[in-house]
Amino acid sequence: QLQLQESGPGLVKPSETLSLTCTVSGGSISSSDYYWGWIRQPTGKGLEWIGTIYFSANTYYNPSLKSRVTVSVDTSKNQFSLKLNSVTAADTAVYYCARGQVAAGYYFDYWGQGTLVTVSS
Amino acid sequence: DIQLTQSPSFLSASVRDRVTITCRASQGISSYLAWYQQKPGKAPKLLIYAASTLQSGVPSRFGGSGSGTEFTLTISSLQPEDVATYYCQQLNSYPLTFGGGTKVEIK
């Protein structure tokens, strides 16, 4: 059974960089059948897609965050990561990592449990 | 960007009622639409993909239909465990976008 687990600091200071890692277990991150994504959700609000990385290393980012975000993959560790720099209180949210299916519609079929990141001094 | 408008934003219905949620896209997205269920404190769970394909393990009372710009999620007989917020997502083009959500409660 595939599992995804987010990890990283739960508290980040304003203007600093938010760094999260998603560890994938029960399957390989090195497959052209899938892509990997980050989604966030401020408390009490809806879902916002952050960015996506493919096996080819192609990345796509939400234009509203593009200048601040980087998604990367470490195949040796079966992990992918999110970096969001120059954070503000508006970046406080639960951050989810997820696996996307390349075939049959690109939907996210497996999600991590989510990790709350608070931006505060 | 493709905007997704869900309606209603809140829905209260009785057990065994038929429930329908609508998701409208600002431009055509073929069948590149997914529906997710999110319970409080939990990650979203995939219910429907490609607009109408039921994800493995999801009860058959959930169904999806539509293509182009108008889509529906139907729960044929609402159960207490279906209390949740439901989101649609378009996967036709980047940036990927979600609808605003529909919160479903039991009357």
Image (cartoon, coloured by chain):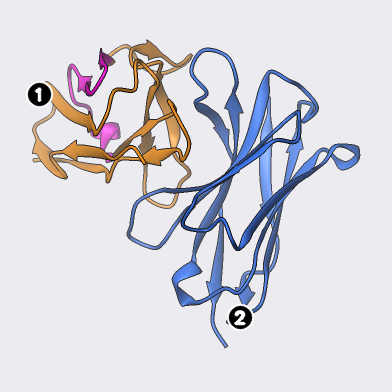
Q: At which x and y percent is residue A17?
A: 67, 71
Q: Chain of mark 2?
A: A
State how far apart marks 2 and 1 are (Cα). Answer: 49 Å
Identity, as a three-letter code, of the amino acid under mark 2? Ser
Q: Nearer the viewer, residue B102 or A49?
A: A49
State which chain is coloured blue: A
What is the quadrant of residue B53 in the picture?
Answer: top left
Specify whether A105 is left or right of A84.
Answer: left
How many numbered discs sit on the rendered protein?
Answer: 2
Tell me whether the residue at label 2 lies in contact with that at label 1, contact meaning CB atoms closer than 8 angstroms: no
* Badge 1: chain ID: B
Q: Is residue A99 above or below residue A103?
A: below
Q: Does residue A47 belong to the magenta stretch?
A: no
- Residue B22, by quadrant, is top left
Q: Is residue B23 above or below residue A63?
A: above
Task: Please rate how many residues cluster around mark 1, counting C-alpha atoms within 10 Å: few if below 14, some from 14 to 19, many from 20.
Answer: some
Label 1 sits on a secondary structure element that is loop
Residue in the picture at 37% in, 43% down: B39
Q: Is residue B1 above or below residue A45?
A: above
Q: Which mark is residue A15?
A: 2
Left or right? Give the position of A15 relative to B58.
right
Q: Mark 2 against mark 1, which lies toward the viewer?
A: 2
Residue, far right: A76
Question: Chain B takes which shade in the image?
Answer: orange
